[in-house]
Amino acid sequence: MKAYIGFDDTDHHDSPYGTGKLVRWFEDELPEGSRCVGVVRQQLLVCDAIPYTSHNSAACMIVEMADPGLLDALIERAVGHIQTHSLPGSDPGLCAATDCNAALADIMDFGQACTHRISTQKQAVQAAAKVHLSGHGGTNDGIIGAAAAVGLTLSGWSGRFVELGRLRDWPAQTTVLELRERGIDVVSADRDTRIPASSDTVITKGWLRPRLIAHRPVLFVSPKGPNLWENVHEKRKKNGNALVEGSHLN
């Protein structure tokens, strides 16, 4: 069984770290009998009418549990984690669900809605009526993004992994086989849709953030030469310089 733990709005504009890093730290707090599968960043609507810290993104940790009864412990620890690491002036929210919940369509629809229209706390509460949703400070507006992060990740067709077995440890070059052995599918974004061979080399650009596609991590690559591919995406730049790791949900 998998649990989906959504966090949002745990930082502020001058934070030394963002929600993405806070969620990645939560792996160290998981109870025995559970393990982190990955952390997925979800992009929500960017609009002047919505208060947000950086890019209006939220994060969801996917946790594999040996026992469904561990969900309560996960929630308790997640609440403690937020209380310890969220920053003054933030409006933290937490959402938790499992893939065995009887009714998930509402929260998945809510997640989709949050990518293209302004949503409210009332709508978040209604959508998450069958799962855990709680606010932990300030205005509690973080419940909106937390619920959306869970809904979008549960859908299996949105977001990018910001953690998946130590993504930051990958070298500048690797092979398709090595990526596949770590559970990352490699898909060509070339118009001719050639299939990368296992022995082919992949230039990672030092920044692997696979997309969540059909409930699997997928790395899109483009051809750079015979038996050579390049990661389609790279770290977002600001004013010509790479942003500092941890300054946003990267």
Image (cartoon, grey):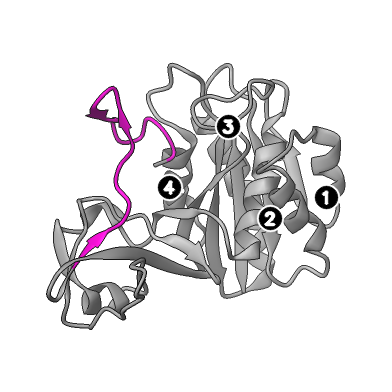
Q: CA distance from mark 2 to mark 3?
A: 23 Å
Q: What's the residue type where badge 1 is placed?
A: Ala
Q: Going 48% across and 44% down the picture, which residue do you hit?
A: 23
Q: Nearer the viewer, mark 3 or mark 4?
A: 4
Closer to the chain start, of discs 4 and 2, is: 4
The earlier-in-sequence mark between 1 and 4 is 4
User: Which element type, helix, strand or loop, lies under badge 1?
Assistant: helix
Q: Which residue is mark 4?
A: 24
Whether the residues at callouts 1 and 3 have beta carbons within 8 Å, the answer is: no
Q: Residues within 10 Å of mark 4 (few under 14, many from 20)?
A: some
Q: CA distance from mark 1 to mark 3?
A: 24 Å
Report the mark closest to the observer, 4 or 2: 2
Q: Dot 3, crowdedness within 10 Å: few (<14), some or many (≥20)?
A: some
Report if the CB atoms under discs 1 and 2 are less than 8 Å apart.
yes
Give percent across and percent down for residue 32.
50, 65
Direction from residue 113 to residue 125 in the image, left or right: right
> What residue is pinned by disc 1?
127
From the image, tell me which residue sits under label 2: 151
Quadrant of the image for the C terminus? top left
The three-letter code of the residue at mark 3 reads: Gln
Image quarter of residue 69: bottom right
Determine which residue is flagged by label 3. 83
Label 3 residue SS? helix
